[in-house]
Amino acid sequence: DMDCLFCKIVSGDIPATIIKKTELITAFNDITPQAPTHVLIIPNKHFENIGEVSIADSKLTSELFKAAADIASEYGLESYRLNINTGAGAGQSVFHAHLHLLAGRAFAWPPG
Ligand code: 5GP
Ligand code: ZN
């Protein structure tokens, strides 16, 4: 999907600070970090949201979560928050599935 911002990050047409890249997933720093660590983890293939990924491809779904756990481990994070906004009403603004890995500050619960 060449109108998609995150597809362009996967292809390298838009630069990003890449943290990890495999055949299936890419992780990169969020351009507007909401915490000292704010990494986005996305499938290389375009899916609109995490629900679509989950329905279509269990291996890809688990690879996204494994990448989050691996990055948390590599960064030595004791606590972190995984956030997945699904649908505009829940705050999704880029319609290419992504996990937010947030860490390095206290987080409120319930979420805003
Ligand atoms: P959402 O609001 O869809 O859950 O999250 C989209 C995220 O993408 C936001 O946190 C936003 O800061 C990030 N973002 C938007 N445009 C860019 C960009 O061009 N580069 C990077 N690295 N992140 C972006
Ligand atoms: Zn895309």
Image (tube, rainbow, N blue to C red):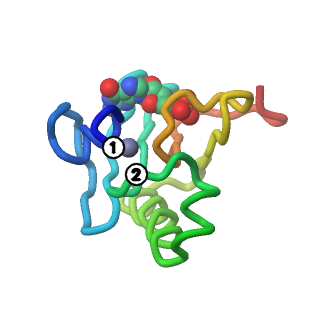
Please indicate whether residue 107 sits to the left or right of residue 82 in the image.
right
Picture quadrant of residue 108: top right
Q: Position of residue 39 (x, y in %)?
A: 41, 42
In the image, residue 32 sits, relative to residue 5, either above or below, namely: above
Q: Which mark is drawn over residue 26?
A: none
Asked if disc 1 and disc 2 are in contact, CB closer than 8 Å, the reply is: yes
Ligand 2 sits in quadrant: top left
**Percent position of residue 24, x then y:** 32, 66
Assess mark 2: CB under 8 A from ligand 2? yes
For this rendering, which residue is in front, 84 or 67?
84
| Secondary structure beneath label 1 | loop
- Cβ of mark 1 under 8 A from ligand 2: yes
Q: Which residue corresponds to mark 2?
A: 46
Question: Label 1: which residue?
Answer: 1
Q: Is residue 40 left or right of residue 27?
A: right
Q: Amino acid at mark 1?
A: Asp
Q: Is residue 20 above or below residue 14?
A: below
Measure the C-alpha gap from mark 1 to mark 2.
7 Å
Res. 22 image quadrant: bottom left
